[in-house]
Amino acid sequence: MNEERKLIVSSSPHIRTPRGTQQIMLDVIIALMPALVAAVIFFGIKPLIVTAVSVVSCVVFEIGYRKLLKKNASYMDLSAVVTGILLAYCLPYTFPWWAVIIGAFFSIVLVKQLFGGIGKNIWNPALAGRAFLLISYAVRMTTWAPARFQHIDAATSATPLASLHAGQLVPGGMNALWDMLIGNIGGCIGEVSALALLIGGAWLVYRKVISLRIPVFYVGTVAMLTLIFSRGNNHIMWMLQNVLSGGLLLGAIFMATDYCTSPVTPKGQIIFGVGCGLLTVLIRYFGGYPEGVSFAILIMNCCTWLIDQHTAPRRFGVVKGKKKEGAKE
């Protein structure tokens, strides 16, 4: 008996996966947890409070905005939760709760939802929120309290990145590098522990949420430039301290790899990573702020469409520059 077979033709994409936005965001949340644990160990309970305020505010603003405009609820995709965590990770644990709410409003309503919601925003919402808060509350955003186990002689000193911005190596040699690796330094909630961020990045790579192109070329560009143009006597130490300090690993792993604001082509991702690294070093060396990660990624976000346009593979059967037969001259 012959079975009737039908050829079903549908619009692209034709490859489907059971992993949706919610599962991807859940993987990102899991990957962000080691950094939060490290922050609680070295800073106490306050980082947890700031993170909770940021997450709740982001979710509430997303629900309220979409209900006000009578749009379908989107909070279940967990993207607002991820934005809330990332925004909190860009803040000092001493940052006031009311200012956190203002940053959450800017990130969710003005940067994400006004552009149409997830997948349509031009800039990374958490980074845009951080940039807004940095401009609006510069003193509070650059006032750091030391870690609980930090050495007494460093209790009143600036963050390692501030020392590097002044052209000085962080004193302590290998001990200083160890503190940067585990998170025993002053700084933002989610950027102090390089080890915790690398563990989270390894999880995202294992789960195939991100590829290594952007993080590797981003961090690699910063490492190469700071090694070549070292401002310290020890070039290797200068490079390592630049890589481990500030928000470089947080930005390279969790923010520069954002699906909607980074290129989709392999070549484009390499260009994006190199561009972020170059801008980061330029801002760190010559800018008014010690850190350049946030502004570097935001600037490259604006170039994503152009990078994708010029790195897109050629369509099969289309000859570049050749006009269609019968087209008007």
Image (cartoon, rainbow, N blue to C red):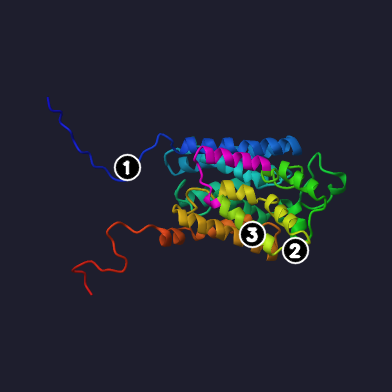
**Can residue 301 be seen at all in this image of the molecule?**
no
Viewer-closest of 254 and 139: 254
Q: Earlier in the sequence, mark 3 or mark 1?
A: 1
Does residue 197 show up magenta in the picture?
A: yes
CA gap between label 3 and label 1 equals 41 Å
Residue tagged 2: 231
Q: Is residue 315 left or right of residue 168?
A: left
Q: Amino acid at mark 3?
A: Met
Q: Quadrant of the C terminus?
A: bottom left
Residue type at mark 1: give it: His
Tell me the magenta residue range.
195-214
Q: Residue at x 25, y 68 (%)?
A: 323
Viewer-side label of 3, 1: 3
Q: What separation in Å lies between label 3 and label 2 (alpha carbons)?
A: 13 Å
First in sequence, mark 3 or 2: give its number: 3
Residue 73 placed where, x, y %? 45, 37
The image quarter containing residue 151 is top right
Residue occupied by mark 1? 14
Disc number lying in front (1 or 2): 2
Q: Is residue 310 above or below residue 208?
A: below
Q: Is residue 141 left or right of residue 171?
A: left
Q: Is residue 252 visible?
A: yes
Task: Residue under label 3, please give it.
Answer: 224
> Which residue in the rendered view is the most extreme toward the bottom?
329
Residues under numbered marks 3 and 2 in contact, where contact means CB atoms less than 8 Å apart: no
